[in-house]
Image (cartoon, coloured by chain):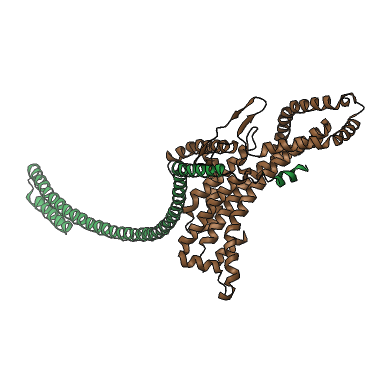
Chain colours: A green, B brown
Amino acid sequence: MLTSGIILLAGSLLEPNPGLIFWTAVTFVIVLLILKKIAWGPILNALEEREKGIQSSIDRAHQAKDESEAILRKNTELLAKADAESDKIIREGKDYADRLRADFTEKAQAEAKKMIATAKDEIEQEKRRALDVLRNEVADLAVKGAEKIIKTALDADMQKKIVDSMIQDLSTKRN
Amino acid sequence: MKRLNVINPKAFIKVFALLVPLLLSGYGIAAASAGQSSSISGGPVAASAVEAVHGGAQAAPEEEKAGDVIMHHILDNRVFAFEPFGSVELPKIVVGGFDISITKHVVMLWLVSATLLLVFLLVGGKYKGMTPRQAPKGLANAIEALVEFIRIDVAKSNIGHGYEKHLPYLLTVFFFILICNLLGLIPYGATATGNVNVTLTLSVFTFFITQIAAFKAHGVKGYLQHLTAGTHWSLWIIMVPIEIIGQFTKPFALTVRLFANMTAGHIIILSLIFISFILKSYIVALAVSVPFAIFIYLLELFVAFLQAFVFTMLSALFIGLATAHAGDGGHEAAAAHH
């Protein structure tokens, strides 16, 4: 509208008003002071604290990452070491077992040999004892036989011959 | 995009519903004075053309009236009017020869202050009961976005070191101007920031803060050196007055920028609406006044935020320029570049 020019020329738009300036200043200062107390303080503090919190969280996360990486590295190392260790233990165990087996076999063989030897000795002794018993038995039998013969036929010559031959037989057989 | 499509028709219908009774009453008066204009019904184009002629014939008194109404709306008043419901006479106070009467703009300033205090009492209370690990919700979140914007993008990037000291002022001035601008867009409201006295006062605050910050940053000697702009002594006779004038042009620019922007938007909206009264035409009202007024209104909403931001931004910039150290040329250049 054309009146806008008139409005400005009238000067009333730029009319100074000390009362309004006074009230603006008073109102603004009071609002500024109150807001500073009730709003800007808590809000800005909260923002700053949150900023710090976020920064420290990021720092902590980085630190935790570094730490976990170090732990992972250590774990890998430990694992490798443990692997080597277990390999060594298994190998040693195998060696030991082999040695043990060999030992046992050897010992068992020796034992067996010894047992065989003692068995042989015992057999020999038994045999000898059996022979002794047999000999006694034979002597007894011979005596009994002689008795019988004596009882039945008192032919001395014949008997003598028989006994002689018998003794001869025995002695040869004994050897 | 979709959202815009949803909102625009709604806003259109609302504003239209508000304007229809207004247009009808205006038309009725015009018809009574014009006499035969209601008999014309040969078609919308013919009607508007004839009425335009009639309007032209009565242009001078109508324009006077429109101008008066616009002025009445823009200027400060001793009466807070709620047409057509009545009006409230505001008290006249004179203390020691100074007229410090309560005017419409003073009442608006107080309403703005009350709004600010209410909003920030709520928000501040929420922040007091909050641990740093909690995220803000709702209103506090919305306010925090603005506060964080002023803190980082306006204060920190323009002032640099020691910006925390000036934050309360910058934040207050931003929200104060913003609410002033927005309340001016509400029916029956008035734009306090559309009054040159109010913007002048706010700029004077910025001016004093800038000067004090400069004194604190450089001391008296450094401040005086700053006035010579680092030139040869033979040029001082030119440079010193220019620098001194420069100190005053900054707040002057702030004053006029805010005042002119806020006043201009309102004058444009009112003028657009008065076109339909002067031309006495529904066609003009529907085709020109209402759509354009809505467009300017939406633009004004944007300008409300923009001018609050610009005022705060420039205040921060001036403080930054005043406190920038001599060896800190890079910062000064960067700030000037904005």
Residue A119 image-quadrant placement: bottom left
Image location (x, y in percent) of residue B234: 58, 76
Does residue B275 appear in the picture of this structure? Answer: no
Q: Farthest residue in the front direction?
A: B97
Which residue is at the front of the view, A134 or B108?
Answer: B108
Image location (x, y in percent) of residue A21: 55, 44
Query: Split into 4 quadrants, where in the image is the N terminus of chain A?
Result: top right
Which residue is at the front of the view, A45 or A108?
Answer: A45
Does residue A148 appear in the picture of this structure? Answer: yes
Which residue is at the front of the view, B235 or A32?
Answer: B235
B165 horizontally vs B289: left or right: left
Which residue: 52% across, 47% down?
A: B171
A173 horizontally vs A4: left or right: left
Image location (x, y in percent) of residue A19: 55, 42
A93 horizontally vs B31: left or right: left
Q: Is residue A67 above or below residue B296?
A: below
A106 horizontally vs B35: left or right: left
Query: Split into 4 quadrants, where in the image is the C terminus of chain A?
Result: bottom left
Image location (x, y in percent) of residue A55: 46, 53
Which residue: 53% across, 44% down?
A: A22
Which residue: 47% across, 37% down?
A: B121
Which residue is at the front of the view, B285 or B309?
Answer: B285
Residue B16 image-quadrant placement: top right
